[in-house]
Amino acid sequence: MTPLNPELDLELTRLLKAPPAKVWRCWTEPELLKRWFTPHPVVTREAIMDVRPGGRFYTVMVIDGVDHASDGCFLAVEPERLLVFTDTLEAGFRPVAEPGLGFTAMLTFTAEDGGTRYTARAMHGKPESAKQHAEMGFHEGWGAVAVQLEGVAQGL
């Protein structure tokens, strides 16, 4: 994994009680992703995922009845080990005109003690973006969805 830059990166690590294969499925199958991807009561209404480098990663979250779409691109895919995506590019590695938060997410899945050492890192291009993401509740939100992710993975 790329070394952590504390000025630009936010990171969350959890030991999930589900094997990497199941956690991976939750991250790469749209119907499973919709079940855990946003902290309740927010709903992920739509997920389109072409899980390959250059493939599309599109979601629609519903917050207080309002749709919030996010379009991005998968950068690296190593099944059951590594998943990297960004909102600064769209499918086919085309730059987006107006990125959302402008970050790249690097997710690692490592088998440990019958479960998965899950690390989610959000890497930003400037300190202000990282600060904004932190203030929006990165640790609380990504922590809550890690619990939801674990629950869905355990049920598979």
Image: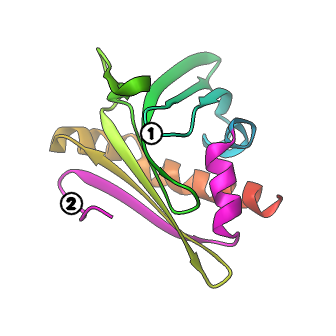
Question: Which residue is drawn at the image coordinates 52% and 20% (left, top)?
Answer: 69
Question: Which residue is drawn at the image coordinates 48% and 25% (left, top)?
Answer: 70
Return the residue nearer the eye: 120 or 90. 90
Return the residue nearer the eye: 4 or 142. 4
Tell me which colouring the rendered structure shows.
rainbow
- Looking at the picture, which amino acid does disc 2 mark? Pro
Residue 139: % across, % down: 43, 54
Q: Is residue 129 above or below residue 11?
A: above
Where is mark 1, residue-wise? 53
Question: Which residue is drawn at the image coordinates 68% and 81% (left, top)?
Answer: 114
Return the residue nearer the eye: 29 or 59. 29
Residue 59: % across, % down: 57, 27
Q: Which residues are magenta?
A: 1-29
Q: Which of pointers 1 and 2 lies earlier in the amino acid sequence?
A: 2
Q: Quadrant of the rendered structure where residue 46 is?
A: top right
Task: Tell me if mark 2 has few (under 14), some (14-19) or many (20+) residues whose alpha carbon lies within 10 angstroms of its own.
Answer: few
Can residue 5 be found in the magenta stretch?
A: yes
Residue 42: % across, % down: 64, 33
Q: Which mark is residue 6?
A: 2
- Looking at the picture, which amino acid does disc 1 mark? Pro
Question: Which residue is drawn at the image coordinates 56% and 39% (left, top)?
Answer: 51
Q: Is residue 155 left or right of residue 145?
A: right
Which quadrant would the C terminus be assigned to in this image? Answer: bottom right
